[in-house]
Amino acid sequence: MSNTLKISLKPNEKIYINGAVIRVDRKVTLELMNDVQFLLESHVIQAEQASTPLRQLYFIVQIMLINPPGASEARDMFRRSLPMLIASFDNQDICSALKQIDRMVGEDHIYEALKAIRALYPLERHALGGNDDIPEASRALAVGA
């Protein structure tokens, strides 16, 4: 059973669908009629933005989605990184969520895994001793859904 999903894009915005990069030249609404792996441009982070452990994990998982030829290597890197990452956090909420993210990746629910990782950024910031008083706009963060 497939779900229909409508996504609205602005002019010159990109979307990554099953590894293809699609840029639209005008405002458009796409209706995805079957199950696809996709990522909005606003959710893509660059290597230099992978500056924390969870952002590094996000970057690895992102590769699985936007670079299908490199997905196997990224999946191997994910499998090697995850146990070390779980061991590095004392926060049980983060550790529990990372185990769920492992399940999502194992079931090939990459978009959901990325969304779950983004949701952990505030917990990670707190766990790493970050200052929550810094305005969100001044941080170099990936935009969350």
Image (cartoon, rainbow, N blue to C red):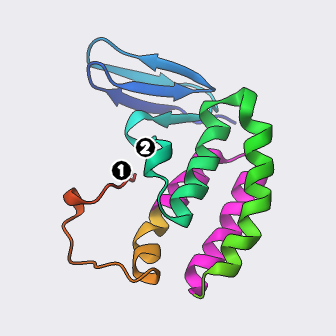
For label 1, the SS is loop
Quarter-of-image position of residue 96: bottom right
In the picture of the structure, the residue carrying the numbered disc 2 is: 43
Q: Quadrant of the N terminus?
A: top right
Segment colored magenta? 91-118
Residue 117 lies within the magenta run: yes
Look at 68% across and 75% down and name the residue there: 86
Pick the front one: 24 or 123: 123
Q: Is residue 18 magenta?
A: no
Dominant secondary structure (helix, strand or loop) of the stretch shown in magenta = helix
Between residue 15 and residue 33, name the one nearer to us. Answer: 15
Query: Residue sitting at 63 percent across and 26 percent down?
Result: 18
Q: Nearer the viewer, residue 19 or 30?
A: 19
Alpha-carbon span between mark 1 and mark 2? 6 Å
Labels in figure, total = 2
For label 1, the residue is 143
Q: Position of residue 112 (x, y in %)?
A: 58, 52
**Amino acid of disc 1:** Val
First in residue order: circle 1 vs circle 2: 2
Classify mark 2: residues with Cα within 10 Å, few (<14), some (14-19) or many (20+): some
Which mark is drawn over residue 76?
A: none
State the image quarter where residue 40 is shown.
Answer: top left
Circle 1: is it few (<14), some (14-19), or many (20+) Cα within 10 Å?
few
Report x, y in % for residue 99.
71, 70
* Above or below for 25 versus 96: above
As shown in the figure, which amino acid type bears the numbered disc 2? His
Pointers 1 and 2 in contact (C-beta within 8 Å): yes
